[in-house]
Amino acid sequence: MRPLSTLVAVLMVPIIFPLVFSGQGDGTPVPTELLHNGRLIVPELNFAVGSTDTGSHWSMKALKTQGAKTTAFSVDSSADEQFTVIVSETGTTGGLGSPSQKKAFVEHMQKSLPAGWRVDPNPTIEETSVPLNGSWKIRATLYLPNDSVLYAYMYSTSGRYTYMMMDYSPAPTEPASFKRFVSTFAVLKSTDNISSSSHSTNWTAILGEAVIAGWLFGKVNKAKLRVLLAVALAGIWLALLFNLRSGEGTQSLFEDVSVFFAAGLATWGYVALAAAWKRRATRNLEVGR
């Protein structure tokens, strides 16, 4: 699974909460060319999402962040609901799984809230396949000065861009309408949402895999078995290639298979070349006699 970027999440939280709670979501109407039968489609930012109902109204607002262009898209429904999609042109660089990262997220969330508001220090953060594999789901409890309680529901999915969808509600369970809204989200081109900075290259692991693959492939002596193994690996490699959108796990497996495949072919090439040189040397020796 692709982890939620700590840096991106922390920078986006101070934007999202004032936007929602202070009424700053009143931007300009979304251009009509981006709306298709109520569905918002933004090719420039590689995403699409559905409206809540036929009476929905979309607006957008450019936001200022540290080093990243960020845009907010808000939809107001006839049922007095407002859902927000924040798009940051910054991909993933880290995770949100450790206590220190979770603490930083909560601290920035607290700083972004209106005076007198308080956030529970233990939000629920879990991996989810909604709207895409590798996404994260966040539920935070907010305590207001009048002793009432509000719940913030967020989904985040990342890659080349970071998308965060948000709703807040007095209900302790996530509104079904918001989950339906989130489920309509999709990236237009999955290959364009693979972040080049989403993870660093582990050269030690790659070298180890190459050595193991070379040793294993060197043990295969029969030509037919080599052909069958090559065909099987090629099939797996192609299947993974066309399913990279499935998430970080698929991408990592694709890298592993690629290393094994390349190391195997290189080993067989070396073995074949060594055998050819050995035969040539033997012939030259016989001729010399």
Image (cartoon, rainbow, N blue to C red):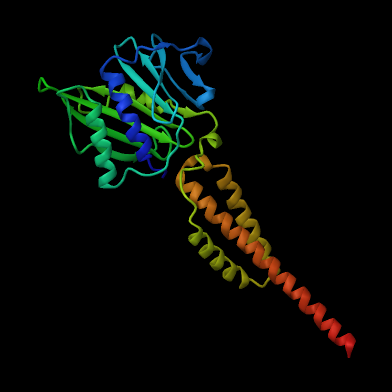
The answer to whether residue 139 is left or right of residue 213 is: left
Can residue 225 be seen from the camera position used here? no
- Say how many tags the image has: 0
The answer to whether residue 274 is left or right of residue 211 is: right
The quarter of the rendered structure image containing the N terminus is: top left
Task: Residue lying at the far left in this picture: please name it.
Answer: 147
Q: Quadrant of residue 75?
A: top left
| Residue lying at 65% horizontally and 59% vertically, measured from the top left | 230
The quarter of the rendered structure image containing the C terminus is: bottom right
The answer to whether residue 171 is left or right of residue 234 is: left
Q: Quadrant of residue 170?
A: top left
Relative height, residue 20 to residue 1 (above, below): above
Give how far across and how far down residue 42 sits, in percent: 51, 21
Give how far across and how far down residue 72 sits, in percent: 40, 21
| Residue lying at 68% horizontally and 71% vertically, measured from the top left | 222
Can residue 32 be seen from the camera position used here? yes
Instruction: From the viewer's side, name the closer residue of 174 and 120.
Output: 120
Give how far across and how far down residue 172 sits, in percent: 20, 28
Give how far across and how far down residue 85 sits, in percent: 39, 23
| Residue lying at 66% horizontally and 62% vertically, measured from the top left | 265
The answer to whether residue 203 is left or right of residue 71 is: right
Relative height, residue 199 to residue 79 (above, below): below
| Residue lying at 24% horizontally and 41% vertically, measured from the top left | 103
Relative height, residue 102 to residue 49 (above, below): below
Task: Residue lying at the far bottom in this picture: please name it.
Answer: 289
